[in-house]
Image: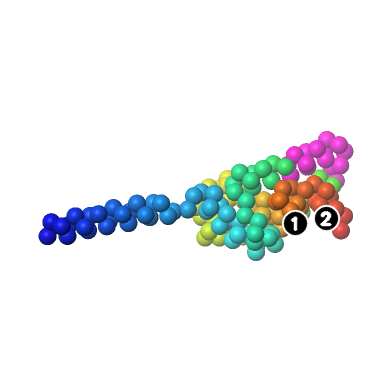
Amino acid sequence: MRHRSVAILLTACLLAAGAVGCSKSYDEKAQDCAAALAKRTGGHRADKPTVGEAEDRVDALDKALADMVRSGYEGVAKDAFDTMEKKTEEGGKGRPDACEPLSKHDYTAMLAAKAIDGLGWTDKSGEFDKLKMVESLGD
């Protein structure tokens, strides 16, 4: 009886340790969210940025728009902003289950980053590409 109790306790401990070791990291959960948002935003399914990469992509867009306004291209910057806002709204209708683990801030960054990808405003490495943005607005 005593050996059976020890075996059950040992098995329970191993299962608990295994469950903790098998859980996904926050970045992996964010990448699952990115994949779920791909269809909604028109982005590439293989584009799975981490939260940090998504924030960098959105920051690059913000910087480009601010630079355009300072350089006298307010109209183009507004067109880009409006296009981005529309794409984000389309993709943000209902939060996918895969995105539930993300904070509101991180989900918003991921949604915006995937919208940028869906608009074709990223290069092959997933970085924001200002030239692609400007070219697409001319279409």
Q: Is residue 127 magenta?
A: no
Q: Main secondary structure of the magenta part?
A: helix
State the residue lying farthest toward the top. Answer: 70
Seen at 60% across and 59% down, the residue is 35
Q: Is residue 69 magenta?
A: yes
Start-end of magenta stretch: 61-75
Q: Quadrant of the N terminus?
A: bottom left
To which residue does mark 2 refer? 136
Q: Does residue 132 sit above or below 94 in this rendering?
A: above
Q: Amino acid at mark 2?
A: Ser
Q: CA distance from mark 2 to mark 1?
A: 8 Å
Residue 97 showing in the rendered view = yes
Asked if residue 4 lies left or right of residue 35, the reply is: left
Nearer the observer, 51 or 107: 51
Asked if the residue under mark 1 is in contact with the one under mark 2, i.e. CB atoms within 8 Å, the reply is yes
State the residue lying farthest toward the front. Answer: 3
Nearer the observer, 15 or 65: 15
Q: Quadrant of the C terminus?
A: bottom right
Seen at 80% across and 38% down, the residue is 67
Q: Which mark is residue 119?
A: 1
Residue 78 showing in the rendered view = no
Asked if residue 52 lies left or right of residue 120, the reply is: left
Seen at 59% across and 47% down, the residue is 51
Q: How is the image coloured?
A: rainbow
Mark 1: which secondary structure?
Answer: loop
- Label 2 neighbourhood size at 10 Å, few (<14), some (14-19), many (20+)? few
- Label 1 neighbourhood size at 10 Å, few (<14), some (14-19), many (20+)? some
